[in-house]
Structures are given as structure tokens and as C-alpha cells.
Amino acid sequence: MSSVSRTAFALLVIICATGGSFPVMASLRDYGIYLGSIGGSTSLRLDNRLRKNTTNKEKSNKLTSTTVIRTEGFIWDPRFMTVDLNLKYATSRRKADTYDSDEDSIGFRFKSVLFPRWRYPYSPIRLSASKTTRTLDSNGGGGVETGYTQMSLNWGLVQKQLGRVRMRYSYTLEESTGWMRERDTVRNRFQAHASKRILKGKWGETRSRYGYQFDTFDERVEDTFDVQHYLFMNNDTKFGRKADLSSNALFYQRYYDGRDDGIDDEYVFASNANLKVQESERFQHYYSLGFRSDDESNNYFGSAGASYSYTHDFDKYLKATASTGALARFGGGSAEQSLMRFNANANGRLAYRLSYDVYRLNAHYSMHVRSPAWGSGLRSAQSEVVRISQSASLAVSRPKNPLYSDIATLRAQYEMAEVDSYSYSADYSARSVYEFSNKASSLISGNVTASQPSRGDFSLGFGSSAMLRYRFGRRVHASVNARQRWRKQANRAFSLFGIKGLVSGRLYRRFNVKFSSALGWTRRIEEIQYSNTSPRDEIRGMAEVSSSIGKLVTSLRYTYSETDYDGDVSSDQSIMLQIKRFFGWRL
């Protein structure tokens, strides 16, 4: 950090320590700057970590200090301009067996609202700016300095012809120097979005949304520059209560300079329209049209399509859905590499639902047909296959039982093409919740899954979990959770078993002591035929306690993990101690 930054930071700390009586405050008010208060926090954190395995051992210590200062107020008059300033300074010193490192960072965030009490047709002007500088020195890799700067401006207004307009400009600068990578990147973005609502008239009620966006990306070190223009428009129109029409259109142009990928510029145009007709409460129509064109240097691609669908609820039990559509794709870079394809599809679905006593039955059948009309050029052979897919499922559930619920599902799918394929599956899951008293409760769940595809092996899976919760008074809670999974497929099997305990709560209202601790063990076994496998055991635990007295907060945390796989044992344990003090003064 430069000497100027250190001097500025020290000056601000002195201002805070003197409670605002420093003469600088008086001089600021002479210029019309009024600060209501200064607050923030300062903290000291110590991390100790030890990692080891059968061959290596590494120990590291890290000491971090962080100071955050915040002040807010106004300039001249609260109706003219309000300000919010945040300053952060942090230092970190890390010592390890292999290398040492020092890290310093200083940054600020400034927010301001100009004319905060502006009302219709104008909105307040919002300004923000932030900058962070980070310096890292390491005896193992040299020094690195990075910087991040951001600025933005937001404003809006309501205009009779344009509607409600919102505008935003942002600027971002990323810098880095050192042995890792030289970087100097600038991003600029301007956005102007608007929405307008046309009240009911001869053609119904319409709401339009449209906008423009401009982006530049300048990678100064690599000498590349990108520019993008983006335009869009959306319209939603209601024709009474029976018809809704929505249409969308977008266009963007992207220009590249200095890139070595062979792309100079790109143009994209896309539009679509959707019409929904509500014939009755149980009968609906949907119509859709779409077009897209993408011109990228010497290559162009496009598509155009249309679709129709309807939904019919025959009664409260039976529902039908059908749709059909066509899509044409074209493109290429030359006459020899042109691509032209045309596909058509049709879909149908029947769904049935029945409730009887505590049982609920759901069944469905669907068919999908996809047929190419013609194709030429590259990859046209992929379009010459007619595919017919059918699927059916049946599910029975009991969701209304307050203590026990389950669901059983059967599924079948078949596809006819050049190579026919099918698959069958069956699932069953159950869940039970029971409260022994107002202090103890349990949750037990399990599932069984079986599947048979035509191009694969039969697989069978089983899973279960159980949880027991207990409450000691109002402030202490404990739980134990166990889970088990198993899956078998041909010559491979996988199993998992784990158990975890958790205790958390709050003690001593005067000192506001919070604590939590957890300990878990997991075993994973993957068995593969003709190979020897060993179980993988993992143990993870943590304990944390914190206390807050007034503006002083203290926390202590310990974590431990151990992995044992085929005799190779590795462990990782850490302990963290943090002391944090909040402060604040009125000026």
C-alpha cells in the first residue's frame, strides 16, 4: 500500500478516535458537508491449521486484522444529496512450513442519492463508486498487486410518449501486476429500458417493454476490443378475457477487434409471437411463430418455425394435451457447405387423476412423433430418421395420512427409430413423521428403485434415512441423523452409510452465549468385479461457541476431518479465534 493511502487511513482513524471533535469536521461543515455519525468495527482473527497424511505434514498460522469504518450524512441539505461512505482496511500475515505471505488490502465504497425527494415524473439520481486495492507478497512466488474499481449511475423518469424510463451507466476497471498475470481490463455499459402501458381501447390493453444496451470490453494488455449493441422489444396484449397475444423481438451487433479466433463481427436477429385463446374454463388454444438469424463473419445460420397446441379438461379426472409444429433450419459458409433441414413433430398426452379415500391415483400416456420432411447439405443424414416415442406412468400415493405417506410409481418408455429402445422402471418411497411429545419427534423415509433399459444393465437401488430430534427446554436442540444407500448394476455395486449428530443452542442470556457442535461418520464402498476395493471412511466434526457482551463479540471454532482409504490416512484440523469490537459516535 502506498504512503498516501496509509496517511489517509491513519487520518480517518484519528477522526474516529476523537469522536468527531477533530477540526477537520468543522472544516467539512464549512463546505456544507454534514456527517451524522461514524461507526464501524475492528476485529482480530487467528487461524491455526494442521494437515497431514502418511508422508507429509504441513502446519500454518494466519493472523488477520480488519477495520471497517462507516459514516453517513448529507451535503448542503437532505433534499439535495445524501452520502454513505464505507472504508475497509485489512492485513493478513500467514506463516507456513513451505512459505510465508503478507497481504494488505484497502478499499472504499461510496453511495449517494442526488435529489432523494424527487417524485413523479422524475426519480432520484443514484451514484455509487468503489475501489479495492490488494497487495500480496510471498517469499515463494513474488509479489502481486490487484485493483478493482467500479462506478455506476442510475436515473429514471416518466414521459408520456416513452412511458417509464430507467437508465444506468456503469464502469469497471480490473488491474493486476505481478508474477501471476498482467491484466488491465475496462468495461463500460449503458442501459436504457422503458415500459409503457396502453389502457383498454378498441384492441384491448397493451403493455410494452423495450430498451437499448451498449457494451464495450477493452483488454489493454492483450490489445483486444469488443463492442456490442443490443435492442429488444416485448409486447403483451389482452383481447378481452379470451385472448392474450405476446410478441418479442431482439437485435444485437457484436464487433471484435484484435481477436485471433477469426471472428470479426456478428449480427443476430430473433422474433417470436404467441397467441393464447381461452375458449372456456376447460379448453385452451396456443399458437406460436418464431424466426432467428445469426450472421457470424462468413458463416450464417437461421431457423423459422410454427406450432399449435391445445389443452382440454374433459372433467375433473381426465385432461388431454396435443401439439404439432414445424421447424426449418438453414445456414452455412458457402454453397458447398450449406445446410438445409425441415422437421415436423406432433405430441399427444392424456392424464388421469382420481382420489379415493386416502389414495390418489395419477396416470398418463404420451406419444411424440418427429419426422424430417427433407434435408440437404451437412449433417442432413441425421434428419432422415423418423422417431416415435411413447411413455406411460402410473402412480399411487397416500398423502393425506398425517403420520405416514407413500408413493409407488411405474414407468415405461419405448422409442421406434433405426434402432428401437425401451426402458422400464419402478419406484416406491415412504415417509413417516411421528411426534412422541412436544420435545421429541422422528422422521423416517425410504425408497426402492429398479430400472431396465434396453441398452444397459438392470439396476436396483435402495435408500433410507432416519432422524430423531429432541429439545432440551427452549434453547437447546439435539438431533441424530442416519442414512443408507445401496445400488447394484451388473458387475458394479455402490453402498454408503453415514450417521451424524448435532447439538446447538443458546445459554446465559446476559452474555448471549451461542454454541453448536456436530460429529459425523460416513463409509463408502464401491465394489467392481475382478478388482479389489477398500472402504472409504470419513469423519467430520466441528464445535463452535460465541459470546456477545455489549459491543464485544468473541467466537471460537474448531473443525476436524479425517479420511481413511486403503490404509492411506489423511487429516485436516483447524482452530479459529476471533475478537470483534463495534464502535460508533454521533457527531
Image: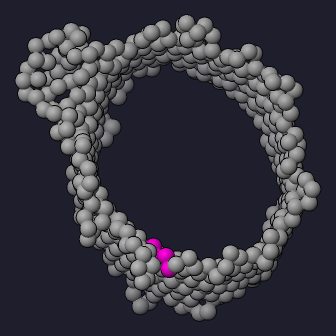
> Could you say where residue 102 lies in the image, as x and y percent from the top left?
34, 20
Corner quadrant of residue 444: top right
| Residue at the image position 80 percent from the left and 31 percent from the top | 467
Specify whether residue 306 is painted magenta: no
The quadrant in which the C terminus is found is top left
Range of magenta residues: 234-239
Q: Nearer the viewer, residue 487 or 150?
A: 150
Left/right of residue 455 with respect to residue 26 in the rendered view: right
> Where's residue 84, x and y in %?
26, 31
The image shows residue 6, relative to residue 108, as above or below, that is above
Identified at 23% across, 28% down, the residue is: 73
Q: Give coordinates of residue 132: x percent, y percent.
A: 28, 33
Looking at the image, the residue that sits furthest to the bottom is 374
Residue 356 makes an appearance in the image:
yes
Q: Nearer the viewer, residue 296 or 578?
A: 578
Residue in the picture at 19% in, 38% down: 79
Lateral position of residue 72 relative to residue 96, left or right: left
